[in-house]
Image (tube, helix red, strand yellow):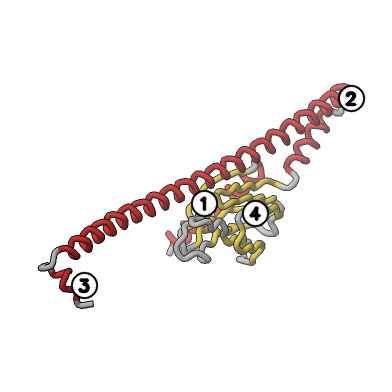
């Protein structure tokens, strides 16, 4: 009993440390997951109150052209915050209402046979992190007005560069996701064409063999097939 209580205490301590760390630095995660047919893939992320949650997902391959999936996001009390049905892609940004482990799931129970490949990006950051850092830096620079003016201009210019870089990265991620989806569609189509070609090839051989056998049976008056045709 003492060991169980100690383990629970250590888990709570690790969760608090993780939440404190997340308050200091933003957390960014990008993954590609496989959602099997008839199942759902769920993930858990510890998030503190007032932190911003940004999630962007896209189905890059669905099999037989079905590129849609269900998406759910729940808070630590397992209240449903976001529920989407049969979406190919989605982008959400919300603010956490309580501290704890948030659960988000990619539900593929809508498919019986098709596996889905989902690429998503999860970002967790304090709501006022950038404003707080900028306010502290400006307070330190107020002693020198000219330096503060120069810093404001540089900060604005660097901020624009940062925004443009983030947009470029998002565009590149989107292009890579589209390329992966198109490659999967091309590979599945190539496999389907090969199988259908083999089926047609074997059918042609069988039909040719049957035609030769039928023609020979017409001129072979002592054969079994000739007696069979003569009965008609």
Give the mark count: 4
The image shows residue 16, relative to residue 141, as above or below, that is below
**Alpha carbon separation for disc pair 4 and 2:** 45 Å
* Residue 113 relative to residue 28: left or right: left
* Residue 11 relative to residue 82: left or right: left
Image quarter where the C terminus lies is: bottom left
Q: Which of marks 1 and 2 is in front?
A: 1
Residue at 71% x, 53% y: name it.
Answer: 50
State the mark number for residue 90: 4
User: Which residue corresponds to mark 1?
Assistant: 61
Q: Are marks 4 and 1 in contact (CB under 8 Å)?
A: no
Provide the secondary structure element on which disc 1 rests. Answer: strand
Residue 119: x and y, percent?
55, 48
State the mark number for residue 229: 3
Provide the secondary structure element on which disc 2 rests. Answer: helix
Residue 43: x and y, percent?
53, 55
Q: Nearer the viewer, mark 4 or mark 1?
A: 1
Residue at 56% x, 60% y: name it.
Answer: 69
**Alpha carbon separation for disc pair 1 and 2:** 56 Å
**Mark 4 / mark 3, whichever is N-terminal:** 4
Q: Which of marks 3 and 2 is in front?
A: 3
**Mark 4 / mark 2, whichever is N-terminal:** 4
Nearer the observer, 2 or 104: 104
**Mark 1 / mark 2, whichever is N-terminal:** 1
Nearer the observer, 162 or 208: 208
**Alpha carbon separation for disc pair 4 and 3:** 66 Å
**Alpha carbon separation for disc pair 1 and 3:** 54 Å
One can see residue 156 in this view: yes
Provide the secondary structure element on which disc 4 rests. Answer: strand
User: Which residue corresponds to mark 2?
Assistant: 145
């Amino acid at each position: 009993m003492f060991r169980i209580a100690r383990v629970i205490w250590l888990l709570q301590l690790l969760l608090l440390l993780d939440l404190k760390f997340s308050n200091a630095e933003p957390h960014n995660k990008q993954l590609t997951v496989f959602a099997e047919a008839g199942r759902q893939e769920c993930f858990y992320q510890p998030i503190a109150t007032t932190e911003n949650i940004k999630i962007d997902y896209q189905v890059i391959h669905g099999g037989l052209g079905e590129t849609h999936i269900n998406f759910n996001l729940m808070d630590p009390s397992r209240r449903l915050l976001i529920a989407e049905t049969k979406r190919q892609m989605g982008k959400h940004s919300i603010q956490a209402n309580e501290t704890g482990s948030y659960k988000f799931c990619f539900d593929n129970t809508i498919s019986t046979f098709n596996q889905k490949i989902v690429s998503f990006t999860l970002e967790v950051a304090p709501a006022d992190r950038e404003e707080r850092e900028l306010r502290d830096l400006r307070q330190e620079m107020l002693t020198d007005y000219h330096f503060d003016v120069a810093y404001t201009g540089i900060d604005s210019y660097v901020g624009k560069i940062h925004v443009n870089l983030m947009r470029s990265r998002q565009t590149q991620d989107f292009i890579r996701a589209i390329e992966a989806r198109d490659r999967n569609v091309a590979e599945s189509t190539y496999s389907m064409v090969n199988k259908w070609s083999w089926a047609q090839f074997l059918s042609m051989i069988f039909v040719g063999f049957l035609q030769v056998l039928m023609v020979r049976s017409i001129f072979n008056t002592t054969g079994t097939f000739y007696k069979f045709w003569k009965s008609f």
